[in-house]
Image (tube, coloured by chain):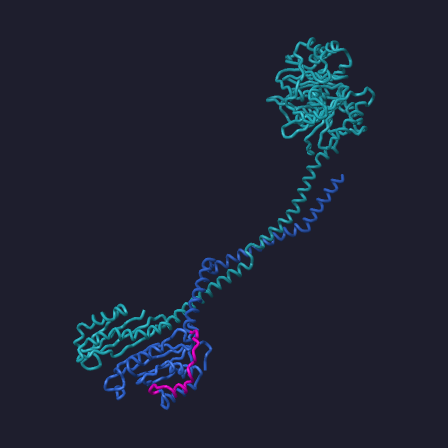
Chain colours: A cyan, B blue
Amino acid sequence: MSALGGGAIGIDVSDGTLKAVRLARRGGRLTLLHTWRAVLPDRPEGELAALHALLQQARPGPGTRVVISAPTRGLFSRTYQIPEMGVERVAELVRYEVLAELQQPADDLVIRHLIGRGAAERQVQAFALRRAQVEAFQQQLAAHGVPWDDLEPAGLALAAFADLERRSRGDRLLLGVGRTASQLVIQSSSGLWLRHLPLGVRDAPADELAERLRDEIDAALVWFVPADQRFRPDELVLSEEGALDPHLTGALKRVLSMPVVRIGELTHIRSSWRLRHTGQDAAQALSMGQAFGLALVGLRASPLRCPVVEGESRRAAARRMPAVTTGVLAACGALIALGELSRVWADRLDATLPSRLEDELLGRAEEAERLRAESDRLERQAAALHDVGLRRVAVQQVRRALAALAPLVTARDPQQRLHVEQLWLAAAEGGRAGTVSLTLHVDPVFDERLRERLEAVLRPEFGPVEVKGPEVAPVEGLSRWVVDNALR
Amino acid sequence: MTRVLVLLLLLAGSFGLFLARGLPQAARVERSASALRERERALLALQAGTDPVEFAEFAELSARHERAQEQARQRRSLLTEDRPDSPPAALAEQLDGTQLGGLRRPSPLADALLRQAAASGTAELTLRSIVHALPEAEGLTVEELALRDEGHPRALPELGLQEVEAQLVLAGALPDVLAALERLAPERGAGLPILSVRSASLRRIEPERWGGVVRELPSPPVRLSCTLAVLFAEGDGG
């Protein structure tokens, strides 16, 4: 069972028998875990001793709400139709109406009310109990060390159980006939009334008890239901010890002009497998409508919750303990985590765009500049070294050039003059290509075709060449031709 | 009650811990955030003031640098790496043993060369390398060989070398002159110093200036005037 309050024990001691039910709630699912039933001894404070013994056995933790039936002898019950107004104003109005009707000092009464829903008006059920009686019961509970959370009217609990297991939109009566007392609940669309009847199965034979109960019901209807309102009950729901007595059930059917029914099975509450292992039967729980209702109130599963007295503050505090513990631990964790997170964030911030990045960027820019300059220098050096290497190629061009001209020279008539006057070679340097220049002195007879002949012999070796001429040579009677060839 | 006390103690302890450690850390967060904003401003200012280098660009620059370095290294090693060869003999020894006209001692040019060689180590080495490179051919005459700046090397920062410039004038049969010219070119694996021809002029000699030597030549004589650049390693000097 959840320590956060998933369970409740409803204990009914209002009618001479101790009946207790333990329910659990997980999500929207209700489970019956255990039931207890014991006839209360007639000796003084017998019910308190039985309560103490039961709770010693059940050992409810602070997470389990213990709801006990409140003493309701002399219970006053009314339903008021009140215009829409604030909750505090409703309480004030209810108190005024009840006190006006009972004509008793306010300090002598415990007044409680339930606010129902309504469109224009609100239906308010008001209850009043004798304060002395309630306080005496509280003192007895405390004296016997009985832990409890709420004291609820048993009749209201019976109504809560019947609403859950046997829903009805019409008028009906609920009658919980106990061993020494009975609870009468009148349910109609116009109100809800409770009455404690000091009359139980122990007090009279079934037929006589049925007639006396009929009289009480008639009197209550006259007393409670306004004369201008019709009350036609569809059924009477019988519960508690009376429901276990077939003679009483039969007698009630005979004396009442309405169907008498019992809640034959649990439809909205699942029975735990543990119930069978403890030799219990879900059917026997059917005569514990009031105890079921009290447990439902403890589980906050009933809209008819109207505690006569709120529970012990220590138990309430203990119930809040897990939440408080969780909250404190969460706060501790949050404080420690905040410190740690701050450290982590600070580390991350310090690591983001570190100072060395600026140096790195600057260094990289400088390094890039150095690399560019160094690469330029190395490329120039490589080019210059290449030029030096090309000087070997250049000197070989002299032989190639002369060899290329050889056919031209040898093919001439020996009487005709055609000779290479000068060959000029300049090696490549500083990005400038090397050049080979040939200066020829020839007889003018060659002038006409020499250009094409020179180009023809030199082009295969050197590609396109620049041939300039003829000019007048310094040697008399000869023409001067110059062939320039760039070495690529 | 005990549980309440324990919880109270726990809460008080946690609060104390928070006061002792959490609050200073929270203050540190504030300071770190402020410092981060400051760093961000500084970075933005830096970005505005400098041209940021992207990683890809930087990687490309590094690759380009490596390529250039490797290329320069390879070319340099091709030109400068030594071949296990016997070094040229001393200049005086070469001048004593050479068959080249004009160089063999005793001759005014040989004396001049020895004087130039005495000026510095690079001068001596330059002349020794040039004389060693010239082929021994009959009729090949060295008419002039002179070092510029008395053989003091000139730095070539782009090459990482230094050079001594020399002027050489040769006369002889065309094949011999061409062979001499080609011997003066850089050679792979020849090591330092590197001989190279910066410029050369090959001229025909007018027949009236041939002289008697022409009878010994297989072809008409030519004159080669060339400017040589002899390259040394940085630091080599006289």
Residue B187, image x and y in percent? 38, 75
* The C terminus of chain A lies in quadrant: bottom left
Residue B206, image x and y in percent? 24, 84
- Is residue A270 something that shows in the picture? yes
Residue A423, image x and y in percent? 28, 77
Q: Is residue A429 left or right of residue A331?
A: left
| Towards the viewer: A45 or B96 | B96
Residue occupying the point 22% across, 74% down: A407
- Is residue A82 something that shows in the picture? no
State whether residue A400 is above or below residue A55: below
Magenta segment includes A239: no
Quadrant of the image occupied by residue A434:
bottom left
* The N terminus of chain A lies in quadrant: top right
Secondary structure mostly taken by the magenta-highlighted segment of the chain: loop
State whether residue B172 is above or below residue A33: below
Residue A448, image x and y in percent? 17, 73
| Towards the viewer: A163 or A218 | A163
| Towards the viewer: A83 or A27 | A27
Magenta segment includes B86: yes
Q: Give the magenta-colored segment's residue range.
A: B80-102
Q: Is residue B114 left or right of residue B39?
A: left
Q: Is residue A261 left or right of residue A388?
A: right
Quadrant of the image occupied by residue A146:
top right
Query: From this viewpoint, which residue is outermost toward the right?
Result: A43
Quadrant of the image occupied by residue A136:
top right
